[in-house]
Image: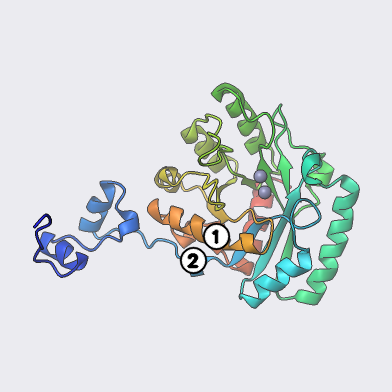
Amino acid sequence: MFFEKNNYENEEAIFEKAGVPFIYPYYRETKDAVDQAINNSLPQTIALNDIKGIIHNHSNWSDGINTIDELADNLIKNNFEYLVMSDHSKTAAYANGLSEERIKEQHIYIDKLNQKLAPFKIFKSIESDILNDGNLDYSDEVLSSFDLVIASVHSNLYMSEEKAMQRLMKAIENRYTTILGHPTGRLLLSRNGYPINHEKIIDACVANHVVIEINANPHRLDLDWSWIPYALEKDVLLSINPDAHSIEGFYDIKYGVLAAQKGGLTAQRNLSSFNLEEFEDYLKKTKAAKNI
Ligand SMILES: [Zn+2]
Ligand SMILES: [Zn+2]
């Protein structure tokens, strides 16, 4: 016979025989997992039902398909506590990015919806383009009108590490940046990300109270899971976000969770696992820490 039948009934029995606590298949990527298992310090990794709010979404105000009402209704039905609306910013004209005038209109619209939908809450956000010089594409006055700001690179993606780092570091140091969106801009199977020094980016995010996104779109999965252990060691907050452009896009969250499990991310270190109260508290405290 090509394969000898082994004497084990299942995987648990193999671990038991070896005297090592069971390690879930998704966490068998590094040797550290075995050491952690032996020391009984395996992380309590995040699960899909740890996600409490859906951060980083596009509506039909920019290049999304659904209305904000439809997005919110779907999340309420599925017991989520909040929605972070972050349509494209004005530089992303190809995606119908929001002018300053339309931002004001959207905020009035969200205020009205929030009155109707409480205790569910829609947060006012934007996916602000990181320009070629590292600045965000609105004035401080406009940036201060959002509950939180996601800063992402969408233009001039083919650049040296030096240029990419200069742009990202400036965006991270911008006190209005709450979350760094898809940090390398990669599209799996079609576009390599621009080169970055991951350690320096993670260190800078810690120093500037910036959360790093784990973009859950299966074409992105960016930050790559392999950087999660370093991120956790430095105590940076990560956030599994779907970057949804439709209701269907919400379901991408599961790919982000699966990728994050490989890196040992816990719910405590994932911003989108914060409940509404914890999330609001986090925004308040970071704003205070950044003097805004
Ligand atoms: Zn983006
Ligand atoms: Zn986006």
Mark 2, secondary structure of its residue: helix
Q: Where is residue 164 in the image (x, y as percent from the top left)?
A: 60, 28
Q: Residue at x 81, y 64 (%)?
A: 110
Q: Residue at x 77, y 52 (%)?
A: 146
Figure quadrant of residue 140: top right
Q: The N terminus lies in which quarter of the figure?
A: bottom left
- The kind of residue tagged 1 is Ile
Figure quadrant of residue 57: bottom right
Figure quadrant of residue 80: bottom right
Q: Position of residue 271 (x, y in %)?
A: 56, 57
Residue on which disc 1 sits: 253
Q: In this view, does 147 lie above or below 133?
A: below
- The kind of residue tagged 2 is Leu
Ligand 2 near label 2 (Cβ, under 8 Å)?
no
Q: Earlier in the sequence, mark 1 or mark 2?
A: 2
Callout 1: 10 Å neighbours few (<14), some, many (20+)?
Answer: many
Instruction: Count the labels in the image.
Output: 2
Q: Which residue is drawn at 63% across and 63% down?
A: 248
- The reply to whether callout 1 and callout 2 are in contact (CB within 8 Å) is yes
Mark 1, secondary structure of its residue: helix
Residue 48 - label? 2
Callout 2: 10 Å neighbours few (<14), some, many (20+)?
Answer: some
Measured Cα–Cα span from mark 1 to mark 2 = 8 Å
| Near-viewer residue (158 or 23) | 158
